[in-house]
């Protein structure tokens, strides 16, 4: 045959063989896939109602017996399942081969293959399942002696036991596998509730269950209450005290401290959750012993011995005999101790007594004072000085040292001071009925200090002088002439100082001044207020009976003022022809060409009275400081001629004469003859007054 025919035949044979192999391979592959699907893929529900319970009168094909008695029987791959309530099922089953699965809670399920054929179906086939429990192991770590319990899925609680001394608990095959709630409890601790704990069959489940200690409460009491309580050195309150939320610990040191009581200590162990009451009982007072020794001033030991039983110890507001047992148990603290006897008494001593101390004190008892009672005429007030020391007196008994001379001085307003030397016995009482002697008034020819208020007045003797300034005196103004010859037939008194603020307040109980203090001259005094002051002072002294007949306190006339200011001089100033600020409180110098005082310091406002040298009559500040009111209404000229005891001038349209100048004026305006004027209501910080005690003058 031709060669190509042979080659085509071989090719066809190969194709045939390969095709046959392919068909066989596909067949095997399909079979393999089917087997895998049947063996390993999920069972397919390809038939329904393969089994049912045999009813009464029906013969069962299959009897299934199960332990436990309540189990579930399933036909794998079918929707058929049955519950065995009594451990046995009688079923009628369609002919075929089946896989049966039996399960029960907390048990290991079992699977069995059963075949139902039709050859002898009148005899039932019996199969038995004994399910084994699904045991697991449990290990719990917690507090020692903690109780362990579990609650299963059905809500049944099972007590398992308690941890050992190391806090360990082990349970082997005591619980079947499943989901549990594990509960760990111990008195004094918050319980641990562990949800959804999975116990796996054949495995050891380890659970950590730490417990939180519950806080404890501690009640602390003392008798008496009110003690400061410290817990381990920290102050926590006042007894009785209840302490909540105490952390468990051992030991706690409790200390109670209360004033004069000894500290109380107690140690206590606090366990979790405990409510502990600690009663520290009766606190013990801190006490000391006091030993007292008594001496009597001026007495021997033998003379003093009979007096000892009458001694009383004054201590802490109580009185005890000298040998009282209470003095051996005196509460700790600070005390003032004094011994007293009906006729003697000691000086108090202050001591500090400390716990369990024995302290000795020695006292010297001195005679109790005598007493004086004064009986004064009504409406009179007295000041008392004993041995030159002022004492208070409120119309009651006055105590004086006994057994020694005492100078007793009695000062009664507007009356002579009375002095007696008294030597009283202890507790002696003396009643003195006082006969006061009024203080006599001023005596002509003598200076006078007004009692109680301290106003000083200088005696200005009778005499004569030329009032005004000569024509050639530098700085002279027309109102200083014409010069007038003045004769005084009666002397009078002039205030040594300008009226001070303290003196003005004493009489008028008011203070108009703008500058300075008590020793400065009063300023801002109107003529009317100055008149009112003089009238009040006159009424006061008249009531005391100290006004010389025909004399009153008043402002001076111009003539009286200049006569007193010049004090016998005929120069521009009582101290001479020249002046600077070292001579008085004014400005500048006099005369103008005089340079000696240019460097002197000028002040603003009045100076304290008496800051410069007085004149020959003893009067201060007649040049400067504050201008001084006179009784005379202002007139632009002096009367001229010759006058004897001139009356104050009238008229002036409500304007009055001022003399002496002030701190605001230059030296030329503070000369003895210088005159100025102001209205009756004028108030100025450069105007004050000087009082005169002079014959009565009536303005007309």
Image (cartoon, grey):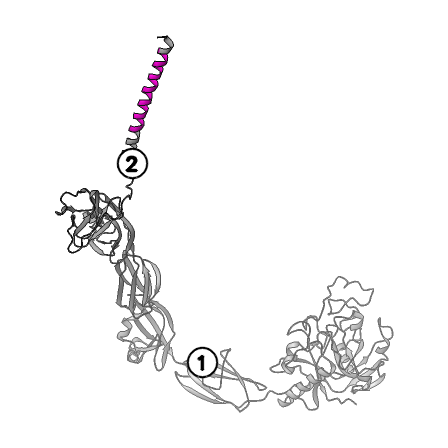
For marks 2 and 1, the one nearer the N-term is 2
Magenta segment boundaries in residue numbering? 6-27
The dot on residue 37 is 2
Residue 320 lies, in percent from the top left, at 30, 77
14 falls in the magenta region: yes
Q: Quadrant of the C terminus?
A: bottom right
Relative to 408, is 164 on the left or the right?
left
Residue 441 lies, in percent from the top left, at 64, 87
Residue 615 in which image quadrant? bottom right
Residue 45 in which image quadrant? top left
Q: Decide if residue 401 is in sight here.
A: yes
- Determine the CA span between mark 2 and mark 1: 144 Å
**Mark 2 crowdedness (10 Å alpha carbons): few <14, some 14-19, many ≥20:** few
The dot on residue 405 is 1
Type of secondary structure dominating the magenta stretch: helix
Q: Nearer the viewer, residue 633 or 310?
A: 633
| Residue 377, placed above or below residue 94 | below
| Residue 223, placed above or below residue 641 | above
Relative to 664, is 536 on the left or the right?
left
Foreground tag (2 vs 1): 2
The residue positioned 29% from the left and 51% from the top of the image is 196
The residue positioned 67% from the left and 76% from the top of the image is 500
């Amino acid at each position: 045959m031709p060669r190509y025919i042979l080659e085509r035949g071989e090719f066809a044979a190969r194709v045939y063989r390969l095709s046959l192999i392919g068909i066989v391979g596909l067949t095997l592959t399909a079979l393999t896939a089917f087997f895998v699907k049947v063996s390993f893929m999920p069972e397919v529900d390809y038939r329904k109602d393969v089994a049912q319970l045999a009813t009464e009168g029906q013969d069962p094909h299959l009897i299934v017996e199960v332990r436990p008695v309540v189990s579930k029987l399933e036909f794998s791959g079918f929707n058929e399942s049955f519950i065995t309530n009594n451990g046995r099922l009688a079923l009628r089953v369609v002919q075929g081969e089946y896989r049966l699965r039996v399960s029960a809670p907390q048990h290991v399920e079992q699977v069995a293959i059963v075949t139902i054929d039709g050859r002898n179906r009148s005899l039932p086939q019996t199969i038995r399942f004994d399910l084994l429990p699904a045991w697991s192991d449990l290990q719990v770590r917690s507090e020692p002696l903690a109780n362990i319990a579990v609650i299963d899925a059905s809500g049944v609680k099972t007590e398992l036991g308690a941890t050992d001394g190391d806090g360990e608990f082990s349970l082997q095959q005591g619980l079947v596998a499943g989901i549990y709630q594990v509960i760990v409890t111990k008195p004094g601790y918050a319980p641990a509730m562990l949800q959804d704990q999975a116990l796996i069959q054949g495995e050891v489940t380890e659970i950590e269950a730490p417990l939180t200690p519950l806080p404890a409460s501690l009640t602390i009491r003392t008798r008496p209450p009110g003690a400061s309580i410290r817990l381990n050195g920290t102050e926590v309150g006042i007894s009785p005290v209840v302490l909540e939320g105490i952390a468990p610990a051992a030991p706690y040191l409790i200390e109670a401290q209360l004033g004069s009581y000894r500290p109380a200590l107690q140690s206590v162990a606090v366990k979790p959750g405990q409510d502990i009451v600690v009663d520290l009982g009766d606190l013990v007072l801190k006490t000391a012993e006091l030993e007292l020794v008594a001496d009597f001033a001026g007495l021997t030991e033998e003379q003093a011995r009979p007096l000892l039983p009458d001694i009383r110890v004054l201590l802490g507001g109580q009185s005890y005999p000298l040998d009282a047992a209470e003095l051996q148990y005196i509460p700790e603290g600070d005390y003032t101790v004094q011994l007293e006897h009906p006729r003697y008494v000691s000086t108090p001593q202050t001591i500090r007594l400390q716990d369990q101390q024995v302290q000795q004190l020695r006292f010297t008892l001195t005679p109790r004072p005598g007493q004086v009672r004064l009986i004064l005429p009504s409406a009179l007030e007295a000041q008392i000085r004993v041995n030159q020391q002022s004492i208070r007196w409120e119309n009651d008994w006055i105590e004086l040292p006994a057994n020694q001379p005492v100078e007793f001085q009695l000062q009664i307003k507007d009356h002579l001071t009375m002095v007696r030397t008294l030597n009283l016995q202890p507790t002696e009482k003396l009643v003195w009925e006082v006969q006061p002697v009024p203080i006599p008034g001023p005596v002509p020819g003598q200076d006078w200090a007004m009692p109680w208020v301290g106003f000083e007045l200088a005696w200005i003797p009778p005499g004569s002088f030329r009032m005004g300034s000569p024509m050639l005196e530098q700085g002279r103004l027309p109102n200083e002439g014409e010069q007038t010859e003045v004769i005084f037939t009666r002397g009078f008194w002039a205030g040594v100082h300008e009226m001070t603020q303290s003196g003005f307040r004493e009489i008028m109980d008011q203070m108009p001044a703008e500058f300075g203090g008590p020793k400065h001259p009063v300023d801002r005094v109107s003529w009317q207020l100055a008149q009112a002051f003089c009238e009040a002072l006159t009424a006061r002294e008249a009531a005391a009976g100290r006004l010389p007949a025909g004399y009153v306190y008043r402002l001076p006339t111009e003539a009286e003022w200049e006569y007193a200011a010049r004090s016998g001089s005929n120069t521009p100033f009582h101290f001479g022809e020249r002046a600077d600020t070292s001579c008085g409180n004014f400005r500048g110098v006099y005369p103008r060409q005089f340079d000696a005082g240019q460097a002197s310091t000028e002040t603003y406002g009045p100076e304290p009275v008496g800051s410069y040298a007085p004149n020959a009559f003893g009067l201060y500040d007649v040049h400067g400081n504050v201008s001084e009111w006179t009784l005379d209404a202002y007139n632009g000229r002096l009367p001229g001629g010759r006058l004897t005891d001139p009356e104050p001038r009238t008229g002036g349209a409500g304007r009055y004469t001022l003399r002496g100048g002030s701190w605001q004026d230059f030296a030329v305006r503070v000369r003895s003859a210088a005159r100025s004027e102001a209205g009756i209501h004028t108030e100025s910080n450069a105007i004050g007054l000087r009082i005169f005690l002079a014959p009565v003058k009536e303005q007309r």
